Image: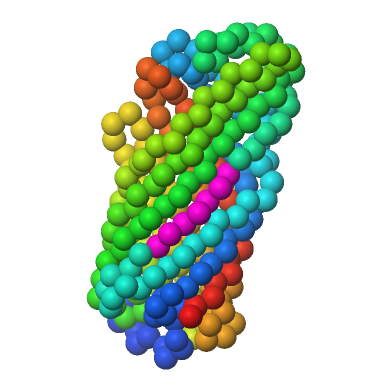
């Protein structure tokens, strides 16, 4: 605790931070791997199966777009577009009932989509040394779809819904050009949960351009009579941002 207090008390360097800008735009891109993707539909009667047996655990490259607007000194808005869709052909290990359709064990095509569109309000707390922290809330619009196809048999569950989440974010200035940054959107309780956590190490190329790299994990799902689905997705990422 003494060491942490000492770090917080260090004076902040004079290099202009990208978070000081009124607007910024960022592109976060990288590879994705599913650690878990379990599905049962309906939740109280279907057959539970692992979507990664059909789509594979490696989802390939993905990207998300981040727009940031500092409305006033301590009031900020963030808009995120995060599309995610994977598909593939694999083997169902047993007869599977999905959304009222029965699929035999064997080769089956699968599609999984969980695209998110986020609007975040963040209140910037007073700076504490090299730390900048913010708290707020995020409105998440999820565009989800799960589909199985085996010959002429096709079953699809698609829905668009709203998920509210708490938001915490911050950055720590390591030097004039280097900084550590994190952001968390989270919801727990009721029939489901959501965690979207990113951690990055950034380097300021110029006063306007910033590049970084790090890790993001998204975990969550729902357990109801209508649907059981839980996924855990891991991202290795590169991030490029421009402020204006």
Please tell me how many numbered marks the rendered image carries.
0
User: Residue 114, image x and y in percent?
Assistant: 52, 39
With respect to residue 166, does 147 lie above or below? above
Residue at left offset 57%, top offset 10%: 101
Residue at left offset 32%, top offset 39%: 188
Left or right of 183 in this view: 64: right
Residue 139 visible in the snapshot? yes
User: Residue 75, image x and y in percent?
Assistant: 28, 70
User: Residue 102, image x and y in percent?
Assistant: 60, 8
Front residue of 25/213: it is: 25
Highlighted magenta segment, given as a residue range? 78-84
Residue at left offset 71%, top offset 31%: 88
User: Residue 238, image x and y in percent?
Assistant: 61, 63
Q: Quadrant of residue 193?
A: top left
Residue at left offset 50%, top offset 48%: 217
Residue 93 visible in the snapshot? no
With respect to residue 167, does 32 lie above or below? above
Front residue of 109/40: it is: 109
Front residue of 23/31: it is: 23
Q: Quadrant of residue 120?
A: bottom left
Front residue of 28/212: it is: 28
Residue 80 belongs to the span the image colors magenta:
yes
Q: Quadrant of residue 242?
A: bottom right
Left or right of 89 in this view: 10: left
| Furthest residue in direction left, as rendered | 126
Residue 191 belongs to the span the image colors magenta:
no
With respect to residue 200, does 88 lie above or below? above
With respect to residue 48, does 165 lie above or below? below
Q: Main secondary structure of the magenta part?
A: strand
For the N terminus, the quadrant is: bottom left
| Furthest residue in direction bottom, as rendered | 14
């Amino acid at each position: 605790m003494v060491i942490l207090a000492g770090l917080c008390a260090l004076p902040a360097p004079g290099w202009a931070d990208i978070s000081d800008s009124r607007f910024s735009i960022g592109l976060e891109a990288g590879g994705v791997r599913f650690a878990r993707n379990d599905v049962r539909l309906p939740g109280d009667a279907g057959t539970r199966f692992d979507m990664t047996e059909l789509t594979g655990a490696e989802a390939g490259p993905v990207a998300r777009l981040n727009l940031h607007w500092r409305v006033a000194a301590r009031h900020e808005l963030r808009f995120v577009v995060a599309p995610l869709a994977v598909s593939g052909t694999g083997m169902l290990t047993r007869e599977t009932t999905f959304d009222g359709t029965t699929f035999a064990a064997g080769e089956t095509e699968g599609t999984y989509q969980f695209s998110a569109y986020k609007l975040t309000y963040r209140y910037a707390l007073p700076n504490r040394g090299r730390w900048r922290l913010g708290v707020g809330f995020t409105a998440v619009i999820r565009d989800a779809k799960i589909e199985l196809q085996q010959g002429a048999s096709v079953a699809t569950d698609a829905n668009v819904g709203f998920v509210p989440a708490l938001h915490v974010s911050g950055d720590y200035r390591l030097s004039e050009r280097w900084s550590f940054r994190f952001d968390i959107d989270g919801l727990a309780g009721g029939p489901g949960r959501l965690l979207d956590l990113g951690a990055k190490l950034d380097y300021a190329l110029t006063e306007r351009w910033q590049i970084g790299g790090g890790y993001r994990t998204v975990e969550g799902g729902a357990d109801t009579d209508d649907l059981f689905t839980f996924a855990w997705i891991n991202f290795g990422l590169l991030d490029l941002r421009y402020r204006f």
